[in-house]
Image (tube, rainbow, N blue to C red):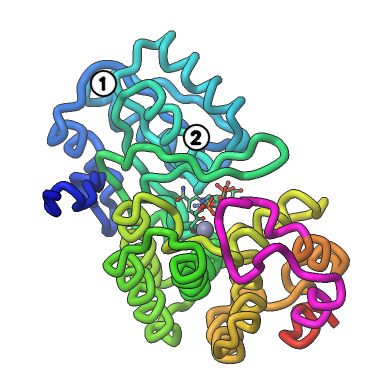
Amino acid sequence: MNKEKDIKRKWMQLPRNVVVGHGVINEVADVCDDLKLSGPATIVTGKTTNKIAGEIVHDLLEQCGRDTDIMISKSATMEQVEAVIEQAVQNRSNYLLGVGGGKSIDVAKLAATKLGIPYLSIPTAASHDGIVSSRASISNGEKTTSVQANSPMAVVADTEIIARAPYRLLAAGCGDIISNYTAVLDWELAHRLRNVSFSEYAAALSRMTAKILIDSAESIKPDLESSARIVVKALVSSGVAMSTAGSSRPASGSEHMFSHALDMVSPVCAHHGEQCAVGTIMMMYLHGGDWRNIREVLKTLRVPVSAEELGIEDKYILEALLVAHTIRPQRYTILGSGLTPSAAEKVAKITKVIK
Ligand SMILES: NC(=O)C1=CN([C@@H]2O[C@H](COP(=O)(O)OP(=O)(O)OC[C@H]3O[C@@H](n4cnc5c(N)ncnc54)[C@H](O)[C@@H]3O)[C@@H](O)[C@H]2O)C=CC1
Ligand SMILES: O=C(CO)COP(=O)(O)O
Ligand SMILES: [Zn+2]
């Protein structure tokens, strides 16, 4: 047998340009020129983020003679993806620009992928690591699924804009990064118990990103552009880990399943990264790891560490813990085939997530 034929093939998609810094939004037309993007474009943004950056991007492109349209997306659902596709086809758009939080970027990402056109990722907050990744987290009304999508052709992360966003969003981004620890532990477990394919490089990059962020925790503070820069770099690095793996596995495990479950069961939700952070404390306890240290670092960063701080009732934390394993049944994690009600209460109480 020819052993060379057994070597797995891999196709990694990464952005061509990653532009990070003060005022870089002003370079958006140059980035489009560099990528040879021409013709009409559609900006996918949110109601708030349109005022913060969507309109700026629109005006900058129009000033350069680029016909640009704005579409306000309300949520990260298939419906919104279809609506963007319809508008982009009507406008004969040659490329999209996702401007805003994780939801606008994910909608632009999946719509561009389905249309077979490029897109740019222009985050207005460092709240999630989907800025760079080749995955889109889309809800079908019941569950959030992680869909394979194209990586952005370019990322334009203006740290001046990002630093002006509420600190809570930056803290949420830190939570999303710190959750890499339990995500990788779950991935290793699935590799050992279920023979799930595993990438040492993606896992090491993901863990290293979380470690660098934790080591920088003391210097991450509100209203500091240098803090926004630290977190953006970590989010880019974590997204590259996902793109390297061709899966969200390096950055999404049981703690993310808990967060997605909370989105389903709780009438009130906190930010994605905040919910993942609380999930990380509990899943680290289940893994037998140093959950107390994770909790302390999150407190230093002013990331919520309890149901009360999330603004979510204890009963929904318990409900989410009980259904989290059903969110992605194919994704094996420390939750296995589910927790019993008494185990769920125990983990949430011991880790001080509920009283
Ligand atoms: N595709 C991927 O690999 C990943 C996807 N995600 C997804 O991303 C989403 C979470 O991202 P988020 O940004 O937390 O959610 P989001 O898009 O809902 O934004 C959170 C809030 O922040 C506001 N906001 C954004 N920038 C602002 C600014 N500069 N000033 C004031 N307000 C601002 C938005 O208007 C929104 O109300 C989830 O749907 C999650 O599943 C998260 C991580 C990775
Ligand atoms: O949020 C993610 C990584 O931070 C990845 O998204 P999923 O949990 O939808 O796979
Ligand atoms: Zn996440």
Residue that mark 2 sits on:
107
Label 1 CB, ligand 1: below 8 Å? no
View extreme (front): residue: 1
- Earlier sequence position, callout 1 versus callout 2: 1
Q: Magenta stretch: residue 45 in it?
A: no
Q: Amino acid at mark 1?
A: Arg
Residue ID at (60%, 65%): 254
Q: Secondary structure at mark 2?
A: helix
Q: Secondary structure at mark 1?
A: loop
| Residue 220 position (above or below residue 310) | below
Residue that mark 1 sits on:
66
What label sits on residue 270 in the rendered view?
none
Q: Is residue 255 left or right of residue 211?
A: right
The span from disc 1 to disc 2 (Cα, nearest Å) is: 22 Å
Q: What span is in magenta?
A: 323-347
- Using the rendered view, name the quadrant where residue 112 is placed: top left
Q: Is residue 23 left or right of residue 196?
A: left
Residue ID at (86%, 71%): 341
The image position of residue 340, as x and y in percent, is 82, 71
Residue ID at (35%, 35%): 57
